């Protein structure tokens, strides 16, 4: 496709090539999963078999060793051309693998042999695609950085109680990374993350996913009722408060490549519009829609929007990769905020471009696209998911960007 993003590393190029090999099959199945509201289990199995899901694991653990989040975004965008649900499912797993690798690298660098050995075993399972991970952060009534789900320490265990929503991959996950809060001995709360294995007593996947779009993502709710996990599976972090640089960076690692889904949806819609416009009408003597000046203008506007979005995503991706390649101890809070500002700029633009491009494609394709069986109908709904994904939605994203640009504290009341 003209002007498309390309990977910047050899491992990334291999991942993108693998992802491109799935697009046709994903597109064939997407409508069925959308209509039936079924998890994309067949697609996920194919991605597992081809090595896409394990791509971020080190080569010594059976993966491709992909470390560039820019390149993960490019691969996600290719998958989204075929099926948006599959793209976000793949991203949430790959980003989890990427995060586990980063923790392992830190443990090795810090000389924490116990932690490094634990993570090494996890990476062996992830590299062999024997373990599927899901993140469980979102919950009703909470901010993205302030979990209400509580973990209470009892001896060598924690007892967890709470409810999560939008848990992508929950339909097949073997392990859940659950954002929780724990009581701080000095008062207040601390952030924490608990690793809860599927089948743990008290853990229930609710099976309640029935959404407007991304219907094949299996993003069911999760209920935890006196769910007991060993203390060594709970990592306790900083006290509650405004997001720290580490909080923002960690969220960026998971959510930046997710923007590839919005890009891929826009690219798919653009291609559908072009194919429709250049098709010769069945009515004799009538020119193809491509010869109509209004159609030409709509195509041009879509082209411009895609070009701008790709440019911003590529620049942001390079900044994100540079952030994680540097020594965290040498990074200022202002520098991290600037990278996050770039990520949020890219997010708002990509989300907006996905919606507007599908809308213009529907205008070109006409009434046929209003049918629920037309691929643009699914893309129209899938495109709207990006705006709800945190951090940040547009209500918070614009103020964050503006405040950082003005040299203000983005988290001040």
Image (cartoon, helix red, strand yellow):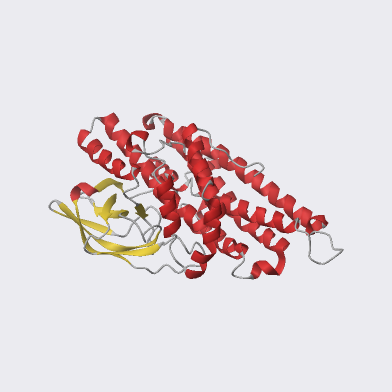
Q: Could you tell whether 56 is left or right of 117 in the image?
A: right
233 and 239: which is toward the camera: 233
- For the N terminus, give its image quadrant: top right
181 and 169: which is toward the camera: 169
Q: Is residue 14 visible?
A: yes
247 and 406: which is toward the camera: 247
Q: Give the residue displayed 52% in from the left and 61% down from the top.
A: 30
| Residue 44: quadrant of the picture | bottom left
What number of labels is visible?
0
Q: Give the residue displayed 32% in from the left and 60% down from the top.
A: 148
The image shows residue 161 at horizontal and vertical percentages of: 25, 62
The image shows residue 165 at horizontal and vertical percentages of: 38, 63
Q: Could you tell whether 400 is left or right of 160 in the image?
A: right
Relative to 295, does residue 119 appear above or below in the rendering? above
The image shows residue 397 at horizontal and vertical percentages of: 52, 51
Q: Is residue 406 visible?
A: no
Q: Could you tell whether 105 is left or right of 76 in the image?
A: left
Q: Give the residue displayed 49% in from the left and 58% down from the top.
A: 85
Q: Give the residue displayed 70% in from the left and 47% down from the top.
A: 304
Relative to 208, does residue 179 appear above or below in the rendering? above
């Amino acid at each position: 496709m003209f002007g498309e993003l390309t990977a910047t590393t050899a491992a990334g190029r291999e991942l993108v090539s693998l992802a491109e090999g799935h697009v046709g099959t994903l597109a064939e199945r997407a409508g069925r999963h959308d209509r039936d509201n079924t998890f994309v289990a067949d697609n996920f199995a194919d991605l597992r078999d081809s090595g896409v899901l394990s791509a971020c694991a080190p080569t010594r653990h059976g993966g491709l060793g992909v470390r560039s989040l820019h390149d993960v975004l490019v691969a996600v965008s290719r998958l989204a051309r075929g099926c948006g649900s599959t793209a976000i499912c793949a991203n949430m797993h790959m980003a989890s693998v990427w995060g586990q690798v980063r923790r392992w690298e830190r443990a090795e660098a810090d000389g924490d042999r116990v932690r490094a050995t634990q993570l090494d075993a996890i990476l062996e399972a992830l590299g062999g695609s024997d373990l599927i991970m899901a993140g469980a952060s979102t919950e009703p009534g909470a901010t993205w950085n302030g979990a209400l789900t509580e973990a209470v320490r009892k001896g060598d265990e924690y007892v967890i109680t709470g409810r999560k929503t939008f848990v992508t991959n929950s339909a097949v996950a073997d392990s859940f990374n659950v954002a929780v809060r724990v009581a701080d001995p000095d008062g207040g709360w601390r952030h924490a993350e608990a690793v809860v294995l599927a089948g743990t007593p008290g853990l229930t996947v609710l099976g309640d996913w029935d959404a407007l779009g991304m219907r094949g993502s299996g993003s069911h709710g999760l209920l935890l009722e006196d769910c007991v996990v060993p203390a060594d599976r709970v990592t306790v972090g900083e006290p509650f408060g405004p997001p720290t640089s580490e909080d923002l960076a960690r969220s960026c690692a998971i959510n930046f490549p997710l923007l590839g889904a919005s890009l891929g949806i826009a690219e798919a819609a653009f291609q559908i519009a072009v194919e429709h416009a250049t098709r010769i009408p069945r009515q004799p003597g009538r020119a193809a829609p491509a010869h109509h000046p209004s159609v030409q203008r709509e195509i041009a506007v879509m082209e411009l929007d895609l070009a701008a979005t790709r440019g911003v995503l590529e620049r942001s991706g390079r900044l994100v990769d540079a952030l994680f390649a540097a020594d965290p101890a040498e990074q200022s809070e202002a520098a991290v905020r600037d990278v996050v500002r770039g990520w949020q700029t890219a997010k708002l633009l990509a989300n907006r471009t996905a919606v507007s491009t599908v809308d213009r494609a529907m205008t070109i394709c006409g009434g046929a696209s209003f049918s629920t069986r037309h691929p643009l109908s699914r893309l129209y709904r899938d495109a709207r998911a990006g705006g709800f994904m945190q951090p940040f939605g547009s209500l918070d994203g614009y103020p964050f960007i503006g405040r950082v640009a003005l040299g203000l504290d983005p988290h001040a009341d």
